[in-house]
Amino acid sequence: MRVLICGGGVIGAAIAYFLSRRGVEAVVIERTGLACAASGKSGGFLALDWCDGTPLAPLARRSFALHDELARTVDDAWGYRRLTTYGGFAEAAGAAPAARRDGDVAWLSADVQVTRRLGSAQTTAQVDPGAFTAALMRAAEAHGATLRRGQVTGLLRGAQAARVDGVMVDDAPVPGDAVVIALGPWSILATQWLTLPAVFGLKGHSLVFETGAQVPAQALFLDLQEADGTALAPELFPRADGTTYVCAISSEAPLPLDPAAVAPDAGAIERLEAICGRLSPVLGQAPIRARQACYRPVTRDGLPLIGRVPGIANAYVATGHSVWGILNAPATGEAMADLITTGAAVAVDLRPFDPARLRPFDPARLRLGER
Ligand SMILES: Cc1cc2nc3c(=O)[nH]c(=O)nc-3n(C[C@H](O)[C@H](O)[C@H](O)COP(=O)(O)OP(=O)(O)OC[C@H]3O[C@@H](n4cnc5c(N)ncnc54)[C@H](O)[C@@H]3O)c2cc1C
């Protein structure tokens, strides 16, 4: 059996990994570069129980366990580690001296108040998401999967209306026994070829600092007000490789058709650099390795689309993971591999994520940045 997976983000790589472990030939088709989009530019923060009370809880809990298992069983490294997670806020610059603070957070400026612990090493962890995606793909390749560079431009349709015969890559046919749409926010393109709900892209900006060993293993979720009153919620993730990732500043800038054309909004990076300098003198002085933007895939009800495409026996979709795509990639990959090979997911009930729950998107309304 040959499964064509459209999109080389963390979701496509995870599906390829779990399919290849079941002896299925998986082909990942990626237009620009493995993990070139959100899967290489996101925070990589993982939480066991932050989705509790929502339909995502079983997927998140299974994924958190699988992240740990993968880190122990796959012979590769992607900066997986458990960490303590704190919440707090940044006072207006120059406000009263900070109250007594845990010595661990001494790398933050005096304006930052750490007010609560949000997670422990039992409940929160992190990965370098680009390294994780690459390692999953390498492990899949070791079990027979392939990564193919090319732009998915359509589907290969045969005589049977209720089946697909493969995909068109750069307008040439590539046959396969099953097709998975895992194009992140670009999954909206598949509404031209299949009956699927809308997937939108929400843009976020981030910086990666070279902080060395000066910053302890702790994640921070802060609230902050800019001088003009704008409320922001920067997230700070020091990583095992001596870098610190910071993201904030969302925007509704339209998604470009070409993933390589994604770039930060004018002024957003300068704004983020100023915020980081205010949050920590360490960040204010550290060299910056990356100034970047990416789009997270979101659906109308905030839940991912994971399952069979309505009306087509051998077409599947796995996207719309929003802010939890790195966390939820392993259980998504595992469930998709089960669904494709046996007809049903075992570890997680996929019914809340059934693509048929949402009304289909009308492709005539499709507007991308440079279409
Ligand atoms: C700022 C930010 C911070 C985040 N932090 C976290 C976090 O801490 N923890 C967490 O769990 N999640 C986080 N997320 C969410 C997470 O990054 C995403 O949910 C996840 O990366 C989505 O993965 P994906 O594989 O679905 O999509 P993508 O990573 O977008 O991959 C889609 C791929 O499809 C390719 N593609 C597009 N068009 C075509 C085509 N026509 N043919 C072939 N290939 C094509 C693209 O090049 C791309 O590589 C964050 C997101 C953002 C934006």
Image (cartoon, rainbow, N blue to C red):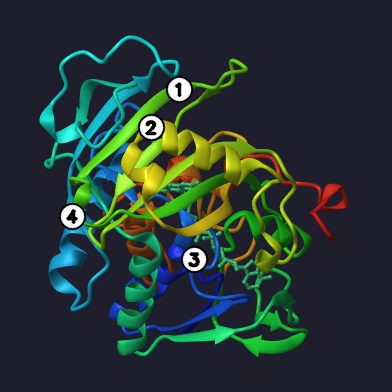
Mark closest to the chain's N terminus, 4 or 1: 4
Q: Looking at numbered disc 2 in the image, what kind of residue is underneath it?
A: Leu
Q: Is residue 110 left or right of residue 216?
A: right
Picture disc at residue 9: 3
Kindly check if marks 2 and 1 are in contact, taking CB atoms under 8 A apart as contact.
yes
Cα separation, mark 2 vs mark 3, equals 31 Å
> Is the CB–ligand 1 distance for label 3 below 8 Å?
yes
Mark closest to the chain's N terminus, 2 or 1: 1
Cα separation, mark 4 vs mark 1, equals 27 Å
Mark closest to the chain's N terminus, 4 or 2: 4
* Other residues around mark 4 within 10 Å, as few (<14) / some (14–19) / many (≥20): some
Cα separation, mark 2 vs mark 1, equals 9 Å
Give the position of the N terminus as an image quadrant. Answer: bottom left
Q: Looking at numbered disc 1 in the image, what kind of residue is underneath it?
A: Leu
> Is the CB–ligand 1 distance for label 2 below 8 Å?
no
Mark 4 or 2: in front is: 2
Mark 4 or 1: in front is: 1
Task: Name the residue beneath numbered marker 4.
Answer: 81
Residue 211 rendering spot, x and y as whole percentages:
30, 53
Cα separation, mark 4 vs mark 3, equals 21 Å
Task: Name the residue beneath numbered marker 1.
Answer: 224
Image height check: is 330 above or below 217?
below
Name the image quarter holding residue 279. Answer: top left
Q: Looking at numbered disc 4 in the image, what kind of residue is underneath it?
A: Arg
Mark 2 or 1: in front is: 2
Picture disc at residue 32: none
Q: Secondary structure at mark 3?
A: loop
Mark 1 or 3: in front is: 1
Picture disc at residue 279: 2
Mark closest to the chain's N terminus, 4 or 3: 3
